[in-house]
Amino acid sequence: MKKLTRSGLTALLLSASALTTPPALAQDSDTLVIARAMDVNSLDPARAFCDTCQFYLTAVYETLITLDADNETLKPNLAESWEINDDFTEFTFTLKDAVFSDGSPVEAKDVVWTLERLKNLKGSPSFLFADITSAEAIDAKTVKITTAAPNAEFVNKVSAPYAGIVNADLAMENGALADESAATDDKAEPWFLAHSAGSGPYTLDSYSPENELRFARNDAYYGDAPAFSEIVVTQISDSVSQAQALETGQVDIAMQVDPDTAASIRSDEVVTEIVPSYNFLYVGFIPGSEGYADVLTKDVRQALALAVDYDAMLEFTVGGNGAQQPAPIPNGFPGTEALEPREYNPEKAKEMLEAAGVSDLKLVAGYPNDNIYGVDFNIMMQKLQQDFAAVGVELELQPLTWSVWRDGYGSGEWPVTAVYYAPDYYGSGQYVAYFGMIDGVPWLDTAAVDQKELLENTTEQTLYAEALQASGEEAAAKYTAIGEQMQDETVILPLVSPNLVLAYRDDIEGVRYSACCNLPLAEISRK
């Protein structure tokens, strides 16, 4: 049988996609249409945690501080200035004059309420602000936030889209709570699926799950008027269909075109740029799954890591358009320059598995059936399956819808999963706070299930505390040491950090990749 290469498959699908392309959307100069596979878990700022959520929240809710175009420098947003005490435990922000979309002023009380709700709701992004001990409105324009321990990254965290300031009065009128009862008694999530309460240049018009997300211009916006009267994000799942819609003018921007597909685009009216990203896809081992505590030991996990041909994985998934990533901290973030790449050594992997007394190992991987950053999860996992088979390990693949995967994720239903991560702000601490084998960190709970003693790493916890008390090169050195600990424990195994394709019509300008916000919609306009 003739082998179909990735580029050949792309060309075949692109030619066939005319049969499956969605109906044309009405467009004019005042409407921006974006194609992407939407991964929305919520539109509530304190619950949302997804790529689509990042650019939605950034356009609708404004943070105190935001990230500049260099993806490293912080700049004022709702806060015109801020001060930090010497030990990184007190952060005082002075607000500029701004109004919410209903015309009411943005005040310190709204900041306090927003951050308290974000912490107390215990939603997906709550881990970022778990260390807040108090938030105080000094006056209508001044707020002071105190953390339980030194946190040199706190101002970076404030630039995360999930920290967008919410109109407290409006949200409370519709069932939102910020006190300690929020985790059980807050009833606002359905309201946030149909309404918004921010100060950003756009508002939520409507949302239809797995169909479209519509923004409307905020006519009360206090800053420069938004370029579009409406923005429509339309659900188009695969890369080739997104490219087809872009070439035919049905959409203005396609967010998930892979490099192979981008190379197949022939229209002179389409611009494609390939840029490095901080995004990555990874496989996660879950030793706490029933029956695997004595099977997925560290030696076995390290052996499985040695079985992966990382160069071939990169070529197979993105045609070489990306990079290997040694640890679950993205290349280019503080502390990553000194990390050694993962080794590919299948013979050593076999020796380690034999020494561990493991034979005929069978694993099940449950993962989302999706295409993220131009990487098809099925293709990635089939390559992993092939690599594991070469060392005598059987990997059964279970591609799942997002809803089914979310139901199983964290319950120990499968010993292996795969997912992706994009930065929420510029700073390495967020990855330790999410992936570290530290008490209270999400991935320790996920991987250990109810057996934290299997994986908890007190050395990592100490290094993290030291990193948050430091800055500059001293902090970077601590994050290098943490990255080495993460490599050694081999719970999170990054497989590919893909380059990002920016694909858009040539009459669109302002499209760029943001390390906090994915796609800053407020900067985009039509020529």
Image (tube, helix red, strand yellow):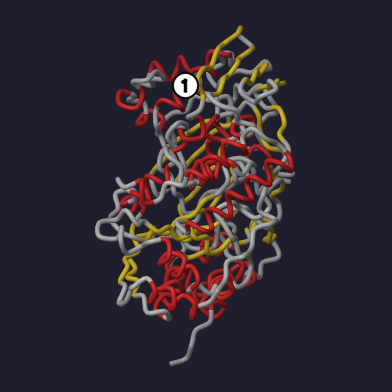
Label 1 residue SS: helix
- For badge 1, the amino acid type reads Glu
Q: Nearer the viewer, residue 196 or 131?
A: 131
Number of numbered markers: 1
Vertical relation: 515 (above or below) 265: above
Residue ID at (58%, 49%): 482
Q: At which x and y percent is residue 71?
A: 70, 44
Residue ID at (64%, 67%): 321
Q: Nearer the viewer, residue 182 or 502?
A: 182
Q: Which residue is mark 1?
A: 116
Q: Quadrant of the N terminus?
A: bottom left
Report if residue 476 is visible in the image: yes
Q: At which x and y percent is residue 258?
A: 58, 65
Q: At which x and y percent is residue 445?
A: 37, 44
Vertical relation: 323 (above or below) 477: below
Q: Nearer the viewer, residue 412 or 298?
A: 298
Residue ID at (39%, 28%): 121
Q: At which x and y percent is residue 386?
A: 43, 77
Q: Nearer the viewer, residue 207 or 116?
A: 116
Can you name the residue that lies furthest to the left here?
A: 291
Can you name the residue that lies furthest to the bottom here?
A: 1
Vertical relation: 470 (above or below) 510: above
Q: Residues within 10 Å of mark 1 (few under 14, many from 20)?
A: many
**Image quadrant of residue 224?**
top right
Residue ID at (25%, 60%): 291
